[in-house]
Each structure stands twice: as C-alpha cells, then as structure tokens.
Image: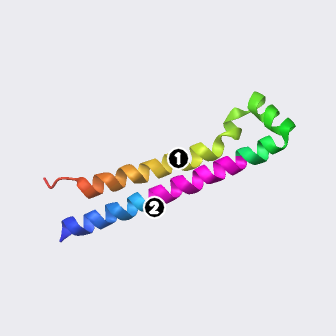
C-alpha cells in the first residue's frame, strides 16, 4: 500500500514539475518577445545585463527539474 501511495506522490510531483517547466518556458519566451519587441531595450539588456534577460528561464527551470527528479525517484525507488 505504501508503494502505491509513493508512486502516486511521485507521479503528482512529476506532473507539477512538467507544468512548472511549461509555464516557465512560456513566460520566458514572452519576456524575450517583450524585450526584443522594443529593440533598443533588448539590445541594451543583452549587452549590460543578460542575467535579467534570461531570468524567467532560470527561475522556473530549476524548481521544475527538481520536482521532476523527485517524482521519478519517488515512483521508481526500490524498497530497502
């Protein structure tokens, strides 16, 4: 019974991680579109502060991948 609940907990964690990745990458591409839609701001950000330019990708990718790894570990962990 514990193994089944751990599997579904891992599956839920995996799905939440995938949703966070999809939302983060969508927001990241929208942010890049806004920045490069105004060409001057996009070029200035690319030259002077590229970390802010790519911030949405790093903000959402790290927690999303962590939840995916946690979900996979929970789903396929062996009992000791």
The Cα atoms of the two marked residues, 1 and 2, are separated by: 12 Å
Answer left or right for 59 relative to 80: right
Q: What residue is disc 2 on?
A: 16
Residue 44: x and y in percent read 82, 32
Residue extending furthest toward the bottom: 1
What residue appears at the point 54 percent right and 55 percent down from the top-left corner? Answer: 22
Is label 2 in a helix, a strand or a loop?
helix
Q: Quadrant of the N terminus?
A: bottom left
Q: Residues within 10 Å of mark 2 (few under 14, many from 20)?
A: some
Where is residue 13 shown, x and y percent of the image? 39, 60
User: CB atoms at circles 1 and 2 under 8 Å apart?
Assistant: no
Q: How many marks?
A: 2
Asked if the magenta segment contains residue 47, the reply would be: no
- What is the magenta range? 16-31
Left or right: residue 35 compared with residue 71? right
Give residue 40's quadrant in the image: top right
Residue 5 drawn at (x, y percent): 26, 69
**N-terminal label among 1 and 2:** 2
**Which secondary structure type mostly characterizes the magenta part of the structure?**
helix
- Badge 1 crowding class, 10 Å Cα cut-off, few under 14, some 14 to 19, many 20 or more, is many
The image position of residue 53, as x and y in percent, is 70, 39
Q: Residue at x 49, y 50 (%)?
A: 63
Q: Identify the residue under disc 1.
A: 61
């Amino acid at each position: 019974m514990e193994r089944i609940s751990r599997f579904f907990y891992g599956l839920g964690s995996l799905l939440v991680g995938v949703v966070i990745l999809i939302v983060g990458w969508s927001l990241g591409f929208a942010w890049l579109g806004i920045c490069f839609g105004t060409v001057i701001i996009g070029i200035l950000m690319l030259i002077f502060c590229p970390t802010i330019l790519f911030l949405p990708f790093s903000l959402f990718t790290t927690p999303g991948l962590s939840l995916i790894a946690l979900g996979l570990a929970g789903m396929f962990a062996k009992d000791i």
